Amino acid sequence: MSGHESTYVPKTGVEKWLDTRLPIVRFGADYMSLPTPKNLNYWYTFGAILTVCLMIQIITGIFLAMNYVPTTAGAFASVERIMRDVNGGWLLRYVHANGASMFFIAVYVHMLRGLYYGSYKAPREMIWILGCVIFFLMIATAFLGYVLPWGQMSYWGAEVITNLVGAIPLIGEPILIWLRGGPAIDNATLNRFFSLHYLLPFVIFGVVVLHLWALHTSGQNNPVGILIPKDREKKDMIPFHPYYTVKDGFALLLFMTMFAVFVFFMPNALGHADNYIPANPLQTPAHIVPEWYMLPFYAILRAVPDKFGGVLAMFGAIGVLFVLPWLDTSKVRSMRYRPTMRIFYIAFVINGLILGWCGGQLPDAPVIGNFSTFNLIDGDLNSFLWLTRFATLYYFAFFFVLLPFVGLKETPLRIPLSISEPVLRGPDAMSGAVPAQAEKKG
Amino acid sequence: MTISIRKVLGVAVAATALAVSAAPASAAGGSKEPRKAGFSFEGPFGTFDQAQLQRGYKVYREVCSACHSMELMSFRTLGEKGGPFYDPKAASPADNRFVRALAAEATINDIDTEIGEPMTRPGTPADKFPSPYPNRIAAAAANGGAAPPDLSVMAKARHDGANYIYSLLSGYVDPPAGLTVNPGQYYNPYMAGDMTPFWTGDHDAVPKGGFIAMPPVLNPDQVTFDDGTAATVDQMAKDVAAFIAWSSEPKATERKQAGMGVLAFLAIFTGLTYASYRKIWKNVGH
C-alpha cells in the first residue's frame, strides 16, 4: 500500500511463515516506517485526530444501538432510558452526540489545512476527492443521526431536508415518497434512517482506507508544499513512527481534553433545547435550525429565493470541492509563498464563519442595530438575507474566480528546493543576494 | 510565515467560538431572560441540595402532578445516589424505605395476572410515575385543547432550563394595560411568544413574554414543607425547578465528578506525551 521500499525483516518463524502467505505484519511495519516530511506542523495532526473521532463514533454507536428503539413511539424514551438506566449510558450518548461536533471541528480544520497548503494539487487529487467523499458521507450520517432521538428538531429537521428533494422538478415528489417510505415522515422514515445511520460509518471507514492508500501512494504534502527530491529524502524525511505517532498523540490528547470539557461539563451546549421535546408533527418549532456544523450550508440554501435553486446552490457548495484541484491554476502549492492568495484565503475562512452565523439567524432580522435601510429586490439591505447572499457570492467566487485567476496573475515568493536547505528556486535563487527565509517549525 | 499561521490559528479559534455561539435569533418581541435562582447544582463542582430536592418533589406531587406527567421517571430513581431520597443505608434504591413508601402512595393501573381484567394496585419502586390523564387526547381535552407538557426532561428542553422554570412559575404578573389576553390564557413575561398582534399600545414597546394556558398555580403556603421551610411562591418555584433539573438528568452529578477524574488523567497523560515528544524530536533539525 505504501510507496516506499519495505525495510521489514521477519524475525521469528511465525512471522516468516506468515509473511509469505499474508504479509500483514509487513504491511503494519511499512505503515509505521513510512518516510514523512519532517516539517509537518500541528495542523497536520488532524488526520490522526479524525481517525480517532471515527473510531469513537463507531464504538459508542454500536453500544447505543443495543439500547435504542427505532420506533416513533419508543425512540425518545429509549434515548432517555440510556441516559438514566443503562450502565454508563449517559457517557456513551454524550460522547456520541458531542463526538459528532468534535468530528466536524476536526474535519473543517483538516480541510482548511489542505486548502492552505495546496494538498489537493497534483499528484494528490485522489486524496482530496476521497476526502470530499468522506465529508459528504459525514454530513449525511450526521443528519440521519440527528433524526434518531426523535425530538422536535429531529423531526422538523428531517422534514425540511427531505423536502429539499421534493424541490427537484418532475421526479422530486416520487423520490421524496421513496426516501421517506411514505407520504409523511413516520415510523418507516425513522427505521430506514436508523439503518442507514448504522451503515454509513462503515462506508466512511472504507473510504478512509482508500484515502490513506492514496496518501501513502503519492506521499505527504508539507507546509513548504514541495515534492521532496529523491536525493534529499534522507535529510528531509523521518519515519512516521515514533516521530509523528508521538506528535499526533500529543495533539490528540489536547483535542480530547476539549472534547472532555464538552462531554462532562456542557454536554448540551452544542445542541438545541427543542430536541428534548418529543417530536410532534402538529406543532412546528419557532425556528428550525440544523446543528452548528451544517449552518453555513443551510445559509447558502436560504440565500437563493427559488427553492430548487437553493438546493442546487447548497449541493454546489459541497460539489465544488470535488473539482478544486482543477480550479486552482497556481503551480505553487503552499499559500506560504502566495501572499495575494493568502489574503483571499483568510477572507474565505472568515466568510465561512459569517455564513455559519447567518445560518442560525432569521433572514429578515437586521444585522447591525435595529433599523432598516432600503429595500433591495426582496429584502432590506441591512438583513441577514443580504449578508448571506454576499457571503454566498464570495464563497463561490473564491473557487470560480479567485483560484483560477489569481493563480495565473500573482507573483509567488521564491520556494526552497528542500525542507532542510535554504536553497531557493527562482530567478535570483543562484545569486545568493537574498537569504532564504528560515523555516520556522509550526 | 509564523504570522500567517498565527492568523490562521486565531481565525480557527474564532471559528469554533462563533460556531458555538451562533444561537438562533429570538422571535420578535421575545421573552424576558430568566432570573438567576443561584442553584447549588450550577457549575462544574455543583451538587444537588437533597433537602431542596425533597421539597421540590413535594411541590411536584401535590401541585404539578395534577396536570403534568413525568413519564420517564421511575420511583426507584428517587432513591439513587444524589437523588432526593437517597439513603446510604439502603441496599439498593428499590430497597429504600422512603422510595417504597412514596411508590405505595401511588395507584397504578395494571392487568390482573389471574383473570386478565384491568385492576389497580399500589405502586412499587419499579413503577413509573403515574400520569394524571389516560392519554394525550384526554389531557388536551381537559385543558382547553393544549396537553400540559411532560416534565421529565423539562430543564433540558428549555434554554437555561432550571432558571426558566423558576422564573416562569414565580413570574406571573398582571398583563400590562393595552394587552388583550384571550380567555383561558395567562400572560407571563418569561413565556416564549410574540405579543405584537395582541398589543394596542406603542409599537416600539411591545411587552416581552407570551401567553400560557397554565394559570398561576403556586400560592403562598400551598404545600407544607416537612423541614419547616416557609412555603413562599419564590421558595416553591425554586425547589420544584431544582427537582425538575435533577429529574431531567439524574446522572448529572456523577457526570461532573467523572469529568474531574478524566480531566486530571488527561492533564497528566498530555504532559507525559509532550515530554516524550520533546525527547524524541530533540535531534531532528527542523
Image (cartoon, coloured by chain):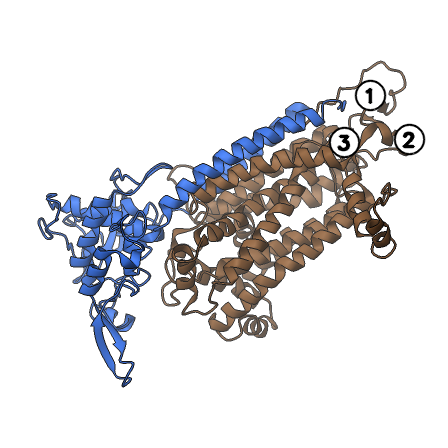
Chain colours: A brown, B blue
The residue singled out by tag 3 in the image is A410
Chain letter of mark 1 equals A
Check the picture and name the quadrant holding the N terminus of chain B: top right
Q: Amino acid at mark 1?
A: Pro
Q: Earlier in the sequence, mark 1 or mark 2?
A: 2
Query: Mark 2 Cα within 10 Å, few/some/many (few <14, many 20+)?
Result: few
Q: Position of residue A208 (x, y in %)?
A: 70, 52
Check the picture and name the quadrant holding the C terminus of chain B: top right
The residue singled out by tag 2 in the image is A231
Q: Earlier in the sequence, mark 2 or mark 3?
A: 2
Q: Amino acid at mark 3?
A: Glu
Chain letter of mark 3 equals A
Return the residue nearer the eye: A209 or A193.
A209
Return the residue nearer the eye: A124 or B175.
A124
Return the residue nearer the eye: A153 or A350.
A153
Secondary structure found at label 1: loop
The residue singled out by tag 1 in the image is A422
Farthest residue toward the bottom?
B115
* Residue at x 85%, y 22% (from the top left corner): A423
Chain letter of mark 2 equals A
Return the residue nearer the eye: A405 or A125.
A125
User: Do labels 2 and 3 touch, CB within 8 Å?
Assistant: no
Secondary structure found at label 3: loop
